[in-house]
Amino acid sequence: MDEALLRSLTPSVLALLVRRGADFAAAEDAVQDALVEAVRVWPADPPRDPKGWLVTVAWRRFLDATRADTARRRREALVDEEPAPGPVAAVDDTLQLYFLCAHPSLTPSSAVALTLRAVGGLTTRQIAQAYLVPEATMAQRISRAKRTVSGVGVSPALGAPPDRRPGEKPRARGRFDQPGDVATVLRVLYLVFNEGYSGDIDLAAEATRLTRQLAAAIDHPEVAGLLALMLLHHARRAARTAPDGSLVPLAEQDRGRWDTESIAEGIEILQTALARDRLGEFQAQAAIAALHADAPTAEETDWVQIVEWYDELARLTDSPVVRLNRAVAVGEADGPRAGLAALAALDDSLPRHTAVAAYLHERDGDLATAAQLYAEAAQKAPNLAERDHLTRQAARLNARRSR
Amino acid sequence: MAKYLLLKHYRGAPAAVNDVPMDQWTPEEISAHVQYMQDFASRLEGTGEFVDGQALAPEGRWVRYDGEGRPPVTDGPFAETKDLIAGWMVIDVDSYERAVELAGELSAAPGAGGKPIHEWLEVRPFLGMQCTVTE
């Protein structure tokens, strides 16, 4: 039994049922039944077209369940809507599920949970474990999210729901054809990627898998940009922490442990996207990551070009965090004094502002100020690995000064 | 999507506005207070924001290693500074603002006279969530 195949087919089967008019919960039940049936039947009698098989069985299950329902009129309307038999269209339906799961009326954590459940095909237990919350908590989050999106319509571009019949509840008009919604989907996927817990499920790998699927389904340079960014970040992952879990800064990473295959793939995807000349923030971020990944040693990093990309990125996002990172790049390209000057223009309450100031002062040779700023930055660090890293930096400088 | 610890204190925190010791409330007031806490927790279970919560006994001890072959030291030398935690709840919410909002609501639990006690609550984010992309 090929579980990976089942898992990869599940979302599109679910999406197809939803598109045919099944409500989310009923469609999920039907798909679950079909999967159970597949596990029972396939070993002895493998289907020629696994997806078509699943769709047929799931749709039949859904109809059975609906028939048993007391809502007679609604049931008959749905049976009537059953499409004519024919080949199963794949792509648009899964895509619709992505857009549904990233619906703007959901909170970020609900959108993430629903995406992992519906598009990723993970179980509630797996998602709960990945987020270190009780399964009951995650189950609530997901069922609330489902309630929020049920009844939401879908744009004509992605397959409209059939016209409603007399007496049927009107469906809300979808807004999934607006370009902003691609951005929402990408944001949700990037959130998943950044969680980075690794237990039973590695969320970074899962996000990359889903983005890859999305990139195959939709021709959009920013989707490609995000996929490239994920591949490039992920390629350095093994080198980013020492065996004891402590952080290894970029300049000190063992570049031999970078995954060159992922880097090559990321760069190729990025170049194809950039050639389309529709720049967006993920492409710009990926370009910066690519310049880091491409340098054979930290000293050979092309900081001048990185500063230029940060200028593009600042223009696209106007984010203070971007300008903070830009100050670091300026410090490398034009020397620490220039970096400190760029930093002075920024609000010092920004996350990591103090850590950047500490680093630039150290490079400038002002060890006393640097040590003090490192200690201050450690107090404000958002996670353990970073706090410990900054504390060690402060301790290192203090030890050197007292020698 | 960040976890926060909400801490209630027996002592150590600044005095609440409606600061009447619980043993001087009426039994109904105590029940109302307890009910408020339970309702609060079950509502967060419903929104998918509840992680865990426990009440703690008012008795506690400071304990310290006191050298090879010697029994641990307890309760000193600065017993008067000791802070005691009454209970805690862990929530998993979308934002810091939401954490503060919920703590504010918890602080409004009814006390003597059925009025909110305006108790101080400590809100602390959890460290240890390691972001994939920090370099």
Image: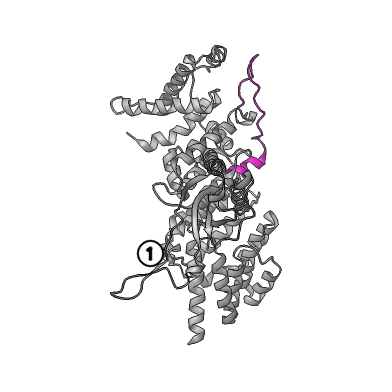
B50 in the magenta segment: no
Q: Which chain letter goes with mark 1?
A: A
Q: Quadrant of residue A365?
A: bottom right
Label 1: how many Cα within 10 Å (few below 14, some 14–19, many 20+): few
Q: Which corner quadrant holds the N terminus of chain A?
A: top left
Our reading of the magenta stretch's main secondary structure is loop
Residue A86 in the image: state x and y as whole percent: 49, 20
Q: Is residue B112 left or right of residue A85?
A: right
Query: Which residue appears at 39% of the width and 33% of the height?
Result: A6
Query: Which residue appears farthest toward the bottom when viewing the image?
Result: A403
Q: Is residue A366 left or right of residue A251?
A: right
The residue nearer to you, when weighing A259 against B8, is: B8
Residue A251 in the image: state x and y as whole percent: 50, 70
Q: Is residue B61 left or right of residue A220?
A: left
Residue A95 in the image: state x and y as whole percent: 55, 35
Q: What type is the residue that disc 1 sits on? A: Pro
Q: Which residue is mark 1?
A: A243
Residue A35 can be seen in this image: yes
Query: Which residue appears at 48% of the width and 72% of the height?
Result: B78
Residue A227 in the image: state x and y as whole percent: 53, 49
Query: Which residue appears at 41% of the width and 24% of the height?
Result: A53
Compared with A283, A258 (above or below) is below
Compared with A24, A297 (above or below) is below
Compared with A127, A375 (above or below) is below
Color encoding of the figure: one colour
Please give the range of residues in magenta: A158-185
A168 in the magenta segment: yes
Q: Secondary structure at mark 1?
A: loop
